[in-house]
Amino acid sequence: DQDDPETIIQVLQERVRAWHGSLRATGGALRAEKCSWSIAAYHWKEGNPQYHSVDSLPGQISITDQHGQEVPLTRHEVSTAIKVVGVVQSLDGSMDGQLKELFERATEMGLRIRESNITRQTAWIGILSLIWPSLRYCLPVTVFTQQEGRRALTQLYKYLLPKLGVPRTLPLVYRYAPRGLQGLGLPDPYVEQGIEHIKRLIFHGGSGTTTGILFRQSIEQLQLEA
């Protein structure tokens, strides 16, 4: 609580050097082009907290290359979205980058389906066993609204529904309703996202995993603020 952002950057630099040094001692090394960093630090403007930018809070993290030269690592703004372990994330928590990624991937798959000559049965197998599993990977760590999630799959369903033998004008309630209720049972990103969140809470909530500890810390902090 008492450390200023400049001190945090200095500490981070020391720990990066220690980490890089331990890797080099065992025959490895960090590659500068694959490393980047950012810092979420606030300053006050007209009574409101705002994130520091690269300009308002200068700072640099660097590593030593194989020639002994200091190589600066790329620094991102807190709002810059980058892909980390397959999910597009930004430090400020914005979902815009991942939404764009999901929309582009779903649209690309939709266009491929449009140009394909597949049977209705193959289309059903494709959406349930191949297409949707590849799209839902990011859902455990996203917080899309219902409108955002459905909008991301607009182009996919536009081209997929005719291949499934379903008119595009079919109401959404029938598209996403379970088959037992006379629906198609197609995945609704918002509902599937909620299921993934609940699954993670059940699995990690009472366990000693890092994720479980972070869950409990967040809930305790929320309780204090409430």
Image (cartoon, grey):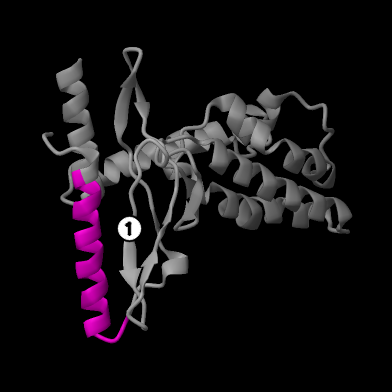
Question: Residue 187: where, in percent of width, then height?
Answer: 60, 39
Q: Residue at x 62, y 41 (%)?
A: 100
* Furthest-left residue in this view: 2
> Label 1 is placed on what type of residue?
Ile
> Does the stretch in magenta take in 148?
no
Q: Residue furthest top?
A: 47
Is 201 or 175 nearer to us in this picture? Answer: 201
Residue under label 1: 61
- Name the spot of residue 201 as percent of width and height, x first: 30, 39
Q: In this view, does 64 lie above or below 176?
A: below
Is residue 218 toward the left or the right of residue 170 in the image? left
- In-image side of 139 versus 133 (left or right): left
Q: Which of the pair 160/86 is nearer the observer?
A: 86
Q: Compared to 154, does 36 lie above or below? A: below
Name above or below for residue 4 compared with residue 181: below
Picture quarter with the N terminus: top left
Q: Main secondary structure of the magenta part?
A: helix
Residue 168 coordinates in the image, percent (x, y)? 82, 32
Residue 132, position as x, y percentages in the image: 61, 49
Q: Residues within 10 Å of mark 1 (few under 14, many from 20)?
A: many
Highlighted range, magenta: 7-28
Please tell me which residue is depicted at 68% across the width and 38% down the height of the picture. 153
